[in-house]
Image: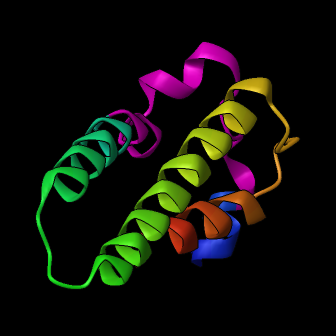
Amino acid sequence: LTMSSATSTTSLPSGLAVLTTFPDVLFIPEIIFGGLVWILVASSKVLLPMLQGWVMFVSVFCFVMSITLLCLYICGAHGGSSSWVTLVSGCDKP
């Protein structure tokens, strides 16, 4: 059994069922820890503020992408396509 056939036979959750599956429920701690990163980076004192700006940009971008993907999953925008599994796994790994 190959991975592509395993992912194509199972349907992706949508609606509140997203919050009951293990890989998708990891969006919640990702969003919480993303907010904590904002607080820590914004409150640090650095010698070069430009570097802090880039770190904040990356942090905010990843946070917004996580929220967007979660909302798209809840709305069912994936339409059951297994390519969304690849999209999410690619976005969650820096």
| 88 or 48, nearer to the observer | 48
Identify the residue shown where x is 22% and y is 44%: 39
Identify the residue shown where x is 47% and y is 23%: 19
Q: What secondary structure predominates along the stretch shown in magenta?
A: helix
| 94 or 12, nearer to the observer | 94
Q: Quadrant of residue 35?
A: top left
Q: Which residues are magenta?
A: 8-28
Location of the N terminus by quadrant is bottom right
- Identify whether 86 is placed above or below 29: below
Residue 63 appears left or right of 38: right
Identify the residue shown where x is 32% and y is 83%: 51
Q: Position of residue 79 (x, y in %)?
A: 88, 41
Residue ranking furthest to the left? 45
| Magenta stretch encompasses residue 22 | yes
| Magenta stretch encompasses residue 25 | yes
Q: Position of residue 6 (x, y in %)?
A: 61, 62
Residue 47 appears left or right of 14: left
Q: Position of residue 59 (x, y in %)?
A: 41, 61
Location of the C terminus by quadrant is bottom left
Identify the residue shown where x is 69% and y is 68%: 5
